[in-house]
Amino acid sequence: MAFARILGTGGCLPEKVLTNHDLEQMVDTTDSWIRERTGIEQRHIAQEGETCVDLAELAARRAIESAGIAPEDIDLIIVATTTPDQIFPSNACLLQHRLDIHGCPAFDVQAVCTGFVYALSVAEKFVRTGAARTALVVGAETLSRIVDWTDRITCVLFGDGAGAVVLRAADEPGILSSHLHADGAYKSLLQVPAGIGNGGTGSPYMEMKGNEVFRVAVTTLGRIVDEALDANGMERSDIDWLVPHQANLRIIQATARKLDLDMEQVVVTVGKHGNTSAASIPLALDQAVRDGRIQRGHTLLMEAFGGGFTWGSVLVRY
Ligand code: ACO
């Protein structure tokens, strides 16, 4: 069986930046409260008319360029998103059309903040079994569209963006292992109640019991780390980089402590990006690859926790 290797990465952030000081003018909050509790200084927000697929397309084109392939080489497209442009076609199909790719499977994965980890894991299985050779995996979100901008508890946390990777079949790893989990019993701690199947009832905005999410996230992410290491017979010292979902600096620091990792070995973008949900890991990966921190041969642990609850990890030899 082939392995699946990350060939290239790309990212895209909307131009518009919303700082904590901007938020001070909108809700009863302060820059210092937001920084101390979350580590966030600013976030990028899609402008009117700018869509999730717009961001996904730019990130995808950059990943394709850095992989040195042509769009027509791609034979699988998976987009992780909670904020698709339309109910259908999926963002993956809309992106496929933008890239002028025809015929290959294209579908969305919805696992909120764990979406990219889910999508990468699914793509890896296609590549390893030979069902696909070159997969485009994108995490893209416009969470600003499901945030209540009068709710200070949630509106300070989120941002928009997209990140992408190209996965290619290879003789050597690649992705070493992936581990996916979910437990819908926690649905009420983090949700957007509105939907289609429920007849359109419920609030269309994010609702969150922040304290409880925080507590479960920290405990769960500690377990994820052990699960990934044990599955590969690895020690904590074998990990070169932690590329975590970027929800909150304090959650990231707790996971780094669990791994005995210095914060220098953790890719942190939450300060500048806020929580971009499914986009946060590929955006962080792209940044650290482009600035030369992450290099070929390094071992990376990507992990995420989010609404559902969903959680998971992917261990990668880059
Ligand atoms: N500005 C000022 N004060 C605020 C704000 C704000 N933006 N938001 C809440 N407060 C107030 C609260 O009203 C509360 O006031 P009170 O004591 O008078 O009632 C006080 O600050 C403390 O509120 P807590 O919710 O206890 O604050 P906490 O330290 O837990 O921090 C936070 C809140 C940042 C949301 C934290 O719980 C957290 O990060 N949780 C994780 C949730 C998360 O990351 N969700 C993202 C999606 S899931 C994921 O990606 C992992």
Image: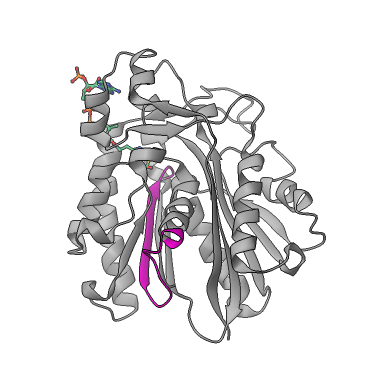
Q: Quadrant of residue 214?
A: top left
Question: Residue 75's x, y, as percent?
Answer: 72, 67
Quarter-wise, where is residue 225 in the image? Answer: bottom left
User: Total number of numbered labels?
Assistant: 0
Q: Is residue 7 visible?
A: yes
Rendered view: 25 above or below 207: above
270 or 210: nearer the viewer? 270
Q: Which residues are magenta?
A: 289-308
* Residue at x 38%, y 19% (from the top left corner): 22
Magenta stretch contains residue 294: yes
Determine the residue positioned at 49% across, 31% down: 192
From the viewer's perspective, is residue 172 above or below residue 150?
below
6, above or below 55, in the image? below
In the rendered structure, does residue 195 fall within the stretch colored magenta?
no
Relative placement, left or right, of 281 versus 9 is left
The answer to whether one can see residue 247 in this image is no
Q: Quadrant of the C terminus?
A: bottom left
Q: The N terminus appears in which quarter of the rendering? A: bottom right
Residue at image coords 36%, 27%: 156
Q: Quadrant of ligand 1?
A: top left
Residue 285 placement, left or right of 129: left
Quadrant in the picture for residue 67 = bottom right
Near-viewer residue (206 or 67): 67
| Residue 57 placement (x, y as % from top left) | 66, 48
Q: Is residue 64 left or right of residue 185?
A: right
